[in-house]
């Protein structure tokens, strides 16, 4: 009468800090500070129905492998490459498991002084990646041509990278007007407002670019720079328009990416009414609101973007 | 070269507390304490491409309508019914917008004393619902036959309800063994461990049951009771098996539901090694770990479950 | 030129779950779920000035002792008694250290079903305690007569217990008017508003009652009940008056306590203006605000309360 | 039988963003992004005992005054100066109220691009200040000589400034050994470990320096730089020694400060045991732990530091 649908399991939030002494720029230590999620799926019906764990590769072993692999690969490996290796290990070594999802958050550290071993956490954003390794899929994430990556042929790999918690603000150059009015309209139109948001951006790499190999760190740096400069350089009529402009700019800046998804909360700044106190307030003093807030979500794709398969799962 | 993909926008976290004086059980006040998300989609290409807001029904108006609708409907309306009405208003009154997603978290309050107006926040769980109202879809959530609900014909409505943050523990009656061993296995098998999790459960209602009308509060109460009693009554060999058992029990307890999704973090409790201090520790003193933790996600469906369409979006 | 002032160090947030099988009411398991902070002070000048750790009892050992002590004392020991024992061990076994501060948060669990081993986390409040064991002080917390408790004579022990995160609401029976008006007054007076707060209450026990021994669990239960019934039974003209009334009631309900401190945030609920939408709103639909919020802090003491010494440190 | 002890009340978390267009360095906009707490005390016995609000200056008016004052003073006013003015207004305009505590958190923004109006939130630390204005105290925070600041004579003003959430790490140059051993010692000694902490530092300014006027922004910049360079430049034998070294360096760098308080959590990084997997791990791969953590708190004072009075309250 009932059936088991989609399912997966794994280890969440494996905190791993990798120090490669002297291996960074200018002979400084190189630090990779990660939070890792691994999630596996495949032939797990008996685990659910009978309690047999014969196919359940323990989440504890998943964690152990993550730490061991870090040692094996070294700290100069970017999170995307690490995730591909980790996911590939799981699906290749565990025949009942056909698919792995690896997600990594990377926290940034900035050098302090000249010692080479002192750092302060950056705090301005979190770098992210989500990688799927799918034995069942054809190469290229289940869509289109492209060479498979990983230990065997016929394995589809998808890579989505991004950033989150990047809070930005334009203190002007933002309007909002011309919207539908009805009985529930109380918002006045404005030709000048603060536009602030916390950028959550993800871009999906083209399967053939993944297969050919990419400089993941350089791609991330370019994406980060593009987001910042586009936000600063765009005169805005709505957060939707800003979203689309950033998405388009990212696709231009990253030829290896074919799809961008953005979630942009509208961090409202309300001009405080000071008239009761005999003061004017010409866009000077604002109340930064918490809740509610607008939330804008959207996707921008290249016309030739291959199907995503499970890349965004 | 680029195109606009899936998108939506709306107002997030509208905090609404509705008091109906004397309208609750035993003449007490009735309280509905909600956090509401509304999200709209439709013909929004020009908003993204040109900055025209002619189709952008403001998120501020969405918020206003939510408060006004609460007054109109009264506090005895369950969150599911409220969400259906709110979403239907948006898609019916704004021709360019064809789809609304309304999500509501409900926080519980328990009466204090006999005054009828004093309450303490329950804190044991959060009730949830996610409703889609989709003009574009055929009736029944975009799949299969079934009567449309809402102000017009041909509107598909899907209702997913659930609960989250319900933390439960079995201090015994849980084993974990028989799993694959490899070079990364350090976890010992166990025939007796603590099983603790924070239940995040969602169930999708059948479109025809939605169309016929349901006692949403009674369904929720039955689901909550089923989750608690099934967790307590199940001898566990893995969290996967517990997930499947709860999912199956929910489908049995709620004939109006056709699909259950569960996310169960494994809140690990480690037996502390007291041997260095000359003490044994026979499953008495545990360390409650934070990170990493296991995470088990799965779906259980009725064999005749209609396609979900966008219900889980 | 510079001197070392007050200092302390310790282990924070030792998560300990103690299960005593069958030892609870009705033969159920007894659970103590704690978060423990230990903090030590004494002759630590050389640790700060020269880096010598000869007097620094490691925080890792503090953690180990907490787990070992739990085993030794059993799960039926209340947090106050556990904290006294733990603090006494540190100051008595480490001659350079003269003072220990032990704080414990206790999380509640409610039984599910009849198995005796299944529980759900309560979530309505957190029970707290802060104990100081002070070798340097005379008995009784450094003030007044009273027998010392602990492994040696002349040790002062103070016990503060409490609760936090108890969110309560009166939907009426609350006024606020008669306050000073000036150029910055925009708030209208009200004869009927929602009064909601998250109670953070602490009560200091009398040193002689601590020395004589107390039923800590019974005291906590009485205090919790008193807070709830007083909140529900008090017609309020301000949160200050509510604070004082609760404080007074606690001192009456707990003869063994001599001082109460309360922190009561005013969780504002704003009546939403629905007039623009042609609707009245007679205290029905509220917006639950986040920030800013009022914050009321106050102390109520018995006239004969001994000096607190470091009890509140 | 009971008496009212220490009490205060006010408005918490007033979020204020002040934009001064073109007033920043290089003609950029100047942004002050603040979270403000105001808290008042004085003759409030009747408010607590009888519910009379005749002396209760509303927290809503406190909030209004904060926004109005921002407009009046302009965005180039540092948080310390703003807090002094705000607190002085309350105590001077409300005779029953004799003391104000104003706390401000300031969030940093870094410019993006050349527009002058685009910014990204820094996220590396939060700047803090706590100011007391005390009519009852003599000048100088209730202690020692010094000129009063504010609208009237005989008003004591204390200023504590600081920073928090500054996470720093030395990947080496840290040892921990030579500590007392007992039955609960399992921690091995180490001559090389990661030392990481989240700095919470506060420094109290000398009353006479406050009275004479200070360049608050320059003092903060010097303190921040001193903390970073001292952390990076100190070979550590314990976090206590690091605390004392930072405190001493701050007193040297800020002659206008007389007392420093530091709270330094020990963010433990554990070398992962990879031996079970046939790998060595020479301080390369670490697990970043959450709980428990060490917590080191301490004070460093100038020998001639005046009494703090309520400065740290």
Image: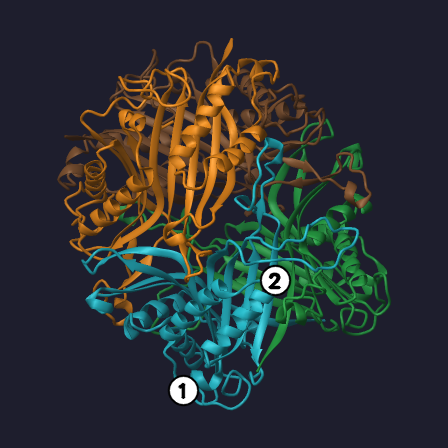
Chain colours: A brown, B orange, C cyan, D green
Q: Are marks 1 and 2 in contact (CB under 8 Å)?
A: no
Indicate the quadrant containing the N terminus of chain A: top left, top right, bottom left or bottom right: top left
Tag 2 secondary structure: loop
Identify which residue, D83 or B201, lies in the foreground.
B201
Q: Is residue C223 visible?
A: yes
The chain ID associated with circle 2 is C
Quarter residue B263 falls in: top left
Q: Nearer the viewer, mark 1 or mark 2?
A: 2
Left or right: D290 with respect to B282?
Answer: right
Q: Which mark is residue C237?
A: 2
Residue A254 drawn at (x, y percent)? 51, 19
Quarter residue C299 falls in: bottom right
Residue B194 drawn at (x, y percent)? 24, 55
Task: State the residue position of label 1.
Answer: C212
Residue D185 drawn at (x, y percent)? 36, 69
Left or right: C113 with respect to C172?
Answer: left
Q: In this rendering, do the residues under marks 1 and 2 share a single chain? A: yes
Residue D300 drawn at (x, y percent)? 65, 68
């Amino acid at each position: 009468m009932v059936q088991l649908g989609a399912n997966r399991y794994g280890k969440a939030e494996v905190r791993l800090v990798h120090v490669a002494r002297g291996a960074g720029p200018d002979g400084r230590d190189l630090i990779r500070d990660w939070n890792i999620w691994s999630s596996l799926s495949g032939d797990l019906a008996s685990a659910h129905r009978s309690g047999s764990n014969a196919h359940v590769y323990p989440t504890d072993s998943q964690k152990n492998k993550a730490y061991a692999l870090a040692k094996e690969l070294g700290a100069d490996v970017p999170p995307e490459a690490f995730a591909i290796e980790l996911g590939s290990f799981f699906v290749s070594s565990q025949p009942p498991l056909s698919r792995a999802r690896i997600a990594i958050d990377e926290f940034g550290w900035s050098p302090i002084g000249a010692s080479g071993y002192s750092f302060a956490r950056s705090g301005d954003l979190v770098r992210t990646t989500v990688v799927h390794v799918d034995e069942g899929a054809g190469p290229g994430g289940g869509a289109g041509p492209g060479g498979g990556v990983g230990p065997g042929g016929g394995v589809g790999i998808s890579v989505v990278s991004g950033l989150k918690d990047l809070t930005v603000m334009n203190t002007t150059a933002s309007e909002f007007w011309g919207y539908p009015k009805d009985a529930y309209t109380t918002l006045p139109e404005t030709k000048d407002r603060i536009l602030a948001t916390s950028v959550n951006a993800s871009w999906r790499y083209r399967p053939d670019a993944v297969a050919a190999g990419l400089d993941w760190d350089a791609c991330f740096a370019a994406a980060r720079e593009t987001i910042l400069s586009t936000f600063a350089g765009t005169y805005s009529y709505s957060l939707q328009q800003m979203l689309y402009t950033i998405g388009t700019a990212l696709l231009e800046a990253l030829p290896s990416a074919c799809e961008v998804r953005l979630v942009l909360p509208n961090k409202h700044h309300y001009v405080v009414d000071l008239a009761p106190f005999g003061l004017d307030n010409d866009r000077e003093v604002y109340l930064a609101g918490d809740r509610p807030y607008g939330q804008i979500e959207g996707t921008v794709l290249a016309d030739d973007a291959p199907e995503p398969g499970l890349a965004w799962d």
